[in-house]
Amino acid sequence: MSQPRPTCRYHALVPKLVLTVIGDDRAGLVEALSQVVTDHAGNWEDSQMAELAGKFAGIVVVTVPKAEAEALTDALRGLDGLLEVSAHPGAEAEQAEPAEGAERLTIDVLGNDRPGIVHDVSAVLAEAGLSIERMSTESRDAPMAGGRLFEAHVVVRVPSSVDLAAVRAGLERLATELLVDIEVTGP
């Protein structure tokens, strides 16, 4: 006789799995993935998913009771053909709070699309020692301008030791070089 699966928060420390998923876009993909997670008493914690060029892709963080972790990983392989899923172990402890004095900076970029914008912006941030927490990008037709527009939204973690004036100056220089608008909001 099998034991009932837990349905509430488990122990203080539970395994976290980071799932990467990709498949041909069609209805029901999230439902199929979430069903496997639910069937193994997993909790869907966080995700970023999107349809890109006819593919559905995403990253999902789930927590799962230790006793179910291996079975969940095996069951995810059963989605092959519908979705390709890779499971990667995450930290067992709750996510640590940002370092004392760390704040967040939001950077929005808008301009004519061209190769290298993401690299150039991320290079300025890396040089300053900033870590990107989230980034979303999109290029779209700009009918009035007769080309394509590129847009990015970036959130970075800024330790108190970072010279924000230097980061802002570097991004302003870059905006001038690339002929794009870069708006920086935050501390």
Image (cartoon, grey):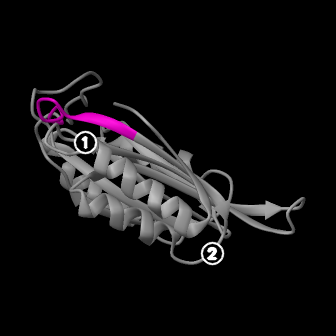
What residue is shown at x 14% (from left), y 35% (from top)?
96
Query: In the depicted view, which residue is nearer to us: 41 or 148?
Result: 148
> Which residue bears the numbered disc 1?
158
Q: Secondary structure at mark 2?
A: loop
Establish if 110 lies above or below 7. Answer: below
Left/right placement of residue 21 relative to residue 110 reads left
Circle nearer the N terminus (1, 2): 2
Q: Position of residue 126 (x, y in %)?
A: 27, 62
> Which residue bears the numbered disc 2?
114
Q: Position of residue 167 (x, y in %)?
A: 32, 51
Q: Which span of residues is magenta-colored?
A: 95-105
Left/right placement of residue 62 relative to residue 10 reads right
Within-10-Å neighbours for mark 1: few <14, some 14–19, many 20+: many
Q: Position of residue 116 (x, y in %)?
A: 51, 76
Give the residue furthest to the bottom.
115
User: Which quarter of the rendering shows the C terminus?
Assistant: top left
Q: Is residue 52 visible?
A: yes
